Amino acid sequence: MEEVLLEWAKTIHKENPVVDAHFDLAAEVYARRRYGEKDVVERCYLSYFQEASLNVIVSSVYVPTQELPEKGLHTAIGQIAALRDDLDPITDQICIVTSKKELDTALEKGKIAMLLALEGLDPVGTDLCLLRAFYDLGVRGASLTWSRRNAFGEGCCKAGEMREIPGGLTELGREAIRKMEELGMYLDVSHLNNDGFADVLKCARKPFIASHSNAWQIHPNYRNLRNDQIEELAVRGGVIGLNACGVIAGVPPLPKKQAFSRLCEHVEYLIAQAGSEHVGFGFDLCNGLSASTPRIYFQVEEDDLLSHHGEMVMLTAELLGRGMKEETLTGILGGNFLRYFRSVIK
Ligand SMILES: [Zn+2]
């Protein structure tokens, strides 16, 4: 990669908001701390976050299927508590934010702001009152489902499978959207199936996002969005985050350069369909989670095309090399998701 592009990319990262809208961090921190590790984020991630000049990261709270239903609530609360414990010694550098004011203050002070989002409402079970409890624990976004059925709807099939799962939202799913909008929690449709997406269009009143999904037209995987879905999401003011998992992007093991070209194709296609103000990054990096827990336990099926967040600048350099304008790039890097989060969170 040309050195000049890389330097240009680093400068753009330093001078503009950089956001990853989906990172499976809380589950990994919980797993590691339960087995005695400490300072997980500081030791394993902080330098990579800084290399990319990241400003905002959304940590998902993801409960593996084996914990459900009995331990769903326990595990979700445990993950949030473990992440807070882990960040306590480094709150001068990275902190969980729960309001627009806290978000802005963190950014003004040069800290990384972290948002919490439930990946599937499974921990809530069927009791919507618990949504308020999670809100009070700091959760500011949620998807109704992961890639599995729950009381709120049907998920799409897992990323490694290829079959369309029919069935839309349940009445409880529709109610959950209303309750989330009332509370000031954003809705994420990544992992939702096509019928569920259509139901969201009928009942969502506020803009929603797909935090970590790519374009079906570039790679037909049921985790990805069709053209009509991309357009609808954008028209309503949402943002789509580029997913950097090989199986979702549609990349067999390839040299980095070719893998990055495929990611750029998704970004360029999403921009063409949605408009440049509705695309961002939600890389869904899972290697750390996968390495920290037995594979069979977490069912991690993805493979990261970015080895770590530090490689974001290489992707940015690749986009610059392909001719993307700097003003477009700044939105994609984080301006678009930041604008969205500031508009939804109270
Ligand atoms: Zn996911």
Image: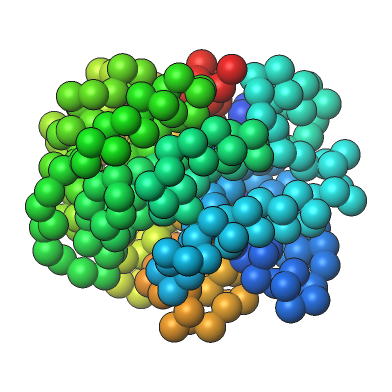
* Rendering coords of residue 34 (x, y %): 72, 73
Q: Judge left or right: residue 11 versus residue 315.
A: right
Image vertical order of residue 274 relative to residue 295, above or below: above
Q: Is residue 95 visible?
A: yes
Identify the coloring: rainbow
* Rendering coords of residue 336 (x, y %): 47, 25
Name the residue nearer the viewer: 85 or 94: 85
Q: Is residue 336 visible?
A: no
* Rendering coords of residue 190 (x, y %): 33, 45
In the rendered image, which quarter contains the C terminus? top right
User: Residue placed at 23% from the left, 24% from the top?
Assistant: 203
Image vertical order of residue 196 relative to residue 70, above or below: above
* Rendering coords of residue 193 (x, y %): 20, 48
Image vertical order of residue 240 relative to residue 246, above or below: above
Q: Quadrant of residue 26?
A: bottom right
Q: Judge left or right: residue 63 versus residue 226.
A: right
User: Residue placed at 38% from the left, 38% from the top?
Assistant: 188
User: Residue placed at 44% from the left, 83% from the top?
Assistant: 296
User: Residue placed at 65% from the left, 46% from the top?
Assistant: 52
Name the residue nearer the viewer: 63 or 240: 63
Q: Quadrant of residue 276?
A: top left
